[in-house]
Image (cartoon, coloured by chain):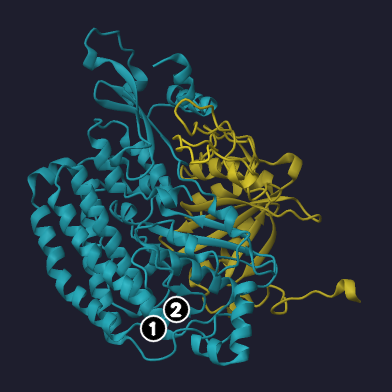
Amino acid sequence: MTSANRDVFAFWPRHNEAVRRRVESKDAWLDSERNTVREASEDVLDHRMTLNIGPQHPATHGVLRCVVQLDGETIEKCVLDIGYLHRGVEKLAESKTYQEFMPYTDRMDYLAPYANNVAWCMAVEKLANIEVPERAEWIRMIMCELARISSHMLWLGVGLMDAGAVSVFLWTFQGREDLYAIFDEISGARFTVSHSRIGGLATDLSPRSVEMIKDFVTRYEEVVRGWQKLLNRNRIWIERNRNVGTVSADEAVALGLTGPNLRGSGVPYDIRIFEPYLKYDEVDFVIPLRDEGDCLARYHVRVEEMLESLSIIRQCLDRLPEGPIRTDDAKKAYPSKNETYYSMEGMIHTFMYTETGVTPPKGASAYHAIESPKGELGFYLESDGTGHPWRARINAPSFTNLQGLESMMEGHPVADVVVLIGSIDPVMGEADK
Amino acid sequence: MSETLKFHFTPVDSPKGGESNLHAKDSTAVADVIEALREQLPEAVTEVFAYAGEYTAFVRRDHLLEVCRALKEEFGFTYLTDLAGVDRFTDDAPRYEVYYSLVNIEAGRRIRLKVRLEEDDAVLPSVEGLFKAADWNERECYDMLGIRFDGHPDLRRMYMPEDFEYHPLRKEFPLLGIPGSLPLPPQVPEGKLTRDPFAAAHGMQPPKSYREPKSDNGT
């Protein structure tokens, strides 16, 4: 390669320089690193080297760039560099109406789009004080739990593939395919659903979709238990995960970990219990907790969460009330399609809602968080009295979890990097906003 | 009369009646904590704002670390869930706001602190020493709004590369970006660096990576 060609690849010279400086100046977490002065060794495997993993690497689950300083095989220091998927959705939100922004939330945590839709809608509903009919709340709950199962299925399949087992990946993707079929039946889209609306939902559940959900819930209880049977005592899986990336409860709180990563360290923080939203205070479920704080504990927490989600969905289906699915206030939510097509007022309201939408009071601000599959997903909104948010801040769980990953990696062999990234379960679309 | 006439889809109400919000949570009703904080540090809290059952304590910048330490060590707010900045962009008051969302996991409470900052003095003491979780959030805040954090161990940009010189979440930053602000790789292997993230939006045609066959009339 000629030198001119090489310059072409150094298109962010100051950025790379800053990352390099950080790796050199970082106060190493390992005590041994701090205290010993190593003499130069002739053995290549003993050498200290700086390795760049990613951003384009299948094991980084997206575009995560890890710059690690290795001592032989051990990671001494780790610096994560994110932002390769930064699209500036917070900036974009400031020029959209509240309803217009919702499809952008699909593309944040794209493994559980429904949970993001609901999180956004609930934040706007809190800001503008909009009532949501009961049936919509129950349906939202069902769909959020399906999204959780879908996300955890992907985590399980991909995590096992990182550890070298391909068959589970195929099984979990079969499960995800069934879930996609359900989302397709309900919202018309397999992946980016955008089905929730401010003040309720876009459409009601069809009888067929209820059947599909029931079928899924009955079949997958056994399937998930089968995966547990395969993995809970699987020697290879346990050896790869036990005592890897151990975080104590205090450390996890200090690092700000959320979701299953926090509960894997024994901290009982789950928004569904902490600040019950929707109807979570009316159903019976337990939060899986583990005290060990290693990758294996996080695995147990997530798989048990899938089973809890199935039980929550079953309870929701039993208690699903009849009634409207969107609030009947044309200033706060879209009118129904019937009203739009067959009445003048309905059509005007639809246009007005698309044009201006809901206008929360000037100076109002609100934060609403839900327990998304990855952890606490919160939106902080500020209103200036118009139809656009003045500030829409996204508190993304993957972002906070990745922050903890940096110190988790230090001290482990480089082979554990993929397992650690998998066990944290980051989604770069969300971490990079 | 006509110049004062403004059209609003719904009448603009003042943000009152926070208690009657349908979605208000018990955890955010922390008036008692703020009261206790005021007793302990009478200078620190200037104002309390409540909306939707959420209490926000406005804290003086000089007292921020004291308040955070008191909340962490005496009131049990050990878990920092969120930290972000807001560009207020108004004439009347300081330009920037940074908020801290702290959680007491055992007691089930959530409190929000806010600090206001002047535009020409947008510097805050870093709380990274108290809450390690603030590290990346403060970096993000610096990247997006240009607010600097004194005492932060590693104040680099979070999302944008260091070669970028603007703070995109400031209100004066155009939505379309600034032409030539971000170097990008060439679009053909032997080409030059692209200096423009939105070339097409600014009327530039990206070079084609292949040669199109000539049409019959030779153009």
- Percent coordinates x, y for residue B76 in the rendering: 47, 55
Quadrant of residue A32 within the rendered picture: top left
Q: Are marks 1 and 2 in contact (CB under 8 Å)?
A: yes
- Percent coordinates x, y for residue A247 in the rendering: 31, 44
Q: Which mark, by number, is residue A204?
A: 1
Palette colour of chain A: cyan
Q: Residue furthest front?
A: B217
Colour yellow belongs to chain? B
Q: Residue at x 69, y 41 (%)?
A: B122
Label 2: chain?
A: A
Locate residue B86 relative to residue A367 in the image: left or right: right
Q: Give whichever of A65, B69 is nearer the camera.
A: A65
**Residue on which the image places disc 2:** A201
Label 2 SS: strand
Other residues around mark 1 within 10 Å, as few (<14) / some (14–19) / many (≥20): some
Other residues around mark 2 within 10 Å, as few (<14) / some (14–19) / many (≥20): many
Q: Is residue A409 above or below residue A105?
A: above
